[in-house]
Amino acid sequence: MPSESEIWFDRARAVTPGGVNSPVRAFAAVGGTPRFMASGSGAWLTDVDGRSYVDLVCSWGPMLLGHAHPAVVAAVTEAISRGSSYGTPTANEVLLAEEIVARTPVESVRLVSSGTEATMSAIRLARGFTGRDVVVKFSGCYHGHVDSLLASAGSGLATLGVSTTPGVPESSAAQTIVLPYNDRAAVEAAFAEHGSAIACLITEASPGNMGVVPPEPGFNAFLAETCTRFGALFVSDEVMTGFRVSRSGQWGTDGATEGWVPDLMTFGKVMGGGFPAAAFGGRADVMAMLSPQGPVYQAGTLSGNPVATAAGLATLQLATEDVYAGVDAVAATISSAATDALTAAGVPHRLQSNGNMFSVFFGEAVAGAAVRDYATAQTQDSEVFKAFFHAMLDAGVYLPPSAFESWFVSGAHDDRAVQHVLDALPAAAAAAAKASPGSTNGSNN
């Protein structure tokens, strides 16, 4: 007899391409039927068949406080009781923008509804401000499904084995220079050849869409300095890391200490508290180019939605240093236990982390040294990950259904949830060992 998830997946495929509204949800990389979730509470998800899972996806990052946090629910309930959308300015838009400005180096912020919209708008603004067209990005960095940024974008494209995508005009792709991540020489060469045409360089502040591949020490500072030297704008994409890896995002862990500031930044996920909300911001003179103050047009009917801003504001106000310390501690416990279990089972692997974001790369090809770029990340053994994923799923732990994604935890991952994960790891490691062509050792950073 089919499960409820199987029934719903069949119905979904009849009316939705692939049965999902975002490709990685389809389980294409791991096989099997995607779990249709019915509810979330704290650290746990419950599917339509009534099975519960410790959630290590956390809606791909936004649920820093856990699912259905009472204070966030209360803020949303109060907001929606007054109406769901007005198409006018609201006080909450200002309050959320003030919270973002207070936590980051940006001077001015424009709210939008998705991370893709934020990066798309930031690119348009950079082109309008500089009068140039060319964009530099890094292979494996994902910045949403913006035409000019889908080239070698990691994440969903990597999960599905797609290196490019139909529908992107050659003229758009031709305006994008794609470089290897963490490669200073490649950056220098690109700017030496094309510097006068480059409008901006955009990078994930710390990539999490090819697995977790942190910037090497000083790399972001080098990018900022290079852009300044050539008159281009430095766009730091913190849709994933913003307000997740620290109170001030990735910038709080490197820019704040090294003394550099991006020209533009993009935000999303955590700042929406689980609702569709995102933002881009930066230098006041650059942001002043936006309509209605300046000539660069950008608009959105649901931008600054009163319910989404209520959820985001409540989440950021509750995201204290104590919360970050707790989330970091849980991430350290689970990541350490994962690599210990895999090492004990003889599974070649490498665990990499950045703050409370972490992921495991499987296979001999990645076990010996740091994964520092997309080309190396692609050499991992996805079949071993598939075995590990399904063993964890069977044990009631919901991992990202892709080897190219970060794992996430929340402030709601208490001792019971953490222990459930730890108890599941040995059997999952054994399953990975059976699927692994090698069985030597693992390492971590």
Image (cartoon, rainbow, N blue to C red):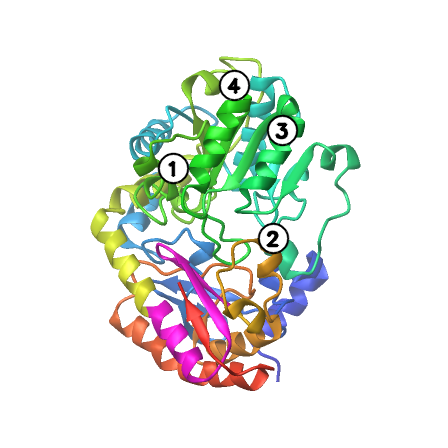
Highlighted magenta segment, given as a residue range: 334-361
- How packed mark 1 is, by other alpha carbons closer than 10 Å (few <14, some 14-19, many 20 or more), is many
Marks 1 & 4, CB-CB < 8 Å contact: no
- Does residue 407 appear anywhere in the picture? yes
Residue type marked 3: Ala
Q: Nearer the viewer, mark 2 or mark 4?
A: 2
Dot 4 falls on a residue whose secondary structure is: loop
Dot 3 falls on a residue whose secondary structure is: helix
Q: In this view, does 30 lie above or below 142?
A: below
Decide whether residue 360 is among the magenta residues: yes
**Camera-nearest residue between 256 and 431:** 256
Residue type marked 4: Leu
- Choose the circle earlier in sequence order: 3 or 1: 3
Q: Nearer the viewer, mark 1 or mark 4?
A: 4
- Choose the circle earlier in sequence order: 4 or 3: 3
Residue for badge 4: 290
Residue for badge 2: 154
**Camera-nearest residue between 368 and 155:** 368
Marks 3 & 2, CB-CB < 8 Å contact: no
Residue 192 disc label: 3
Q: In this view, does 198 lie above or below 433?
A: above
Residue type marked 2: Gly
User: Is residue 152 found left or right of 427 in the rendered image?
Assistant: right
- Choose the circle earlier in sequence order: 1 or 4: 4
- Image position, residue 294 (x, y; %): 52, 13
Q: Which of marks 3 and 2 is in front?
A: 3
- How packed mark 3 is, by other alpha carbons closer than 10 Å (few <14, some 14-19, many 20 or more), is few
Q: Going 52% across and 74% down the picture, which residue do you hit?
A: 389
Whole-angstrom CA distance, mark 2 to mark 4, is 30 Å
Residue for badge 1: 309
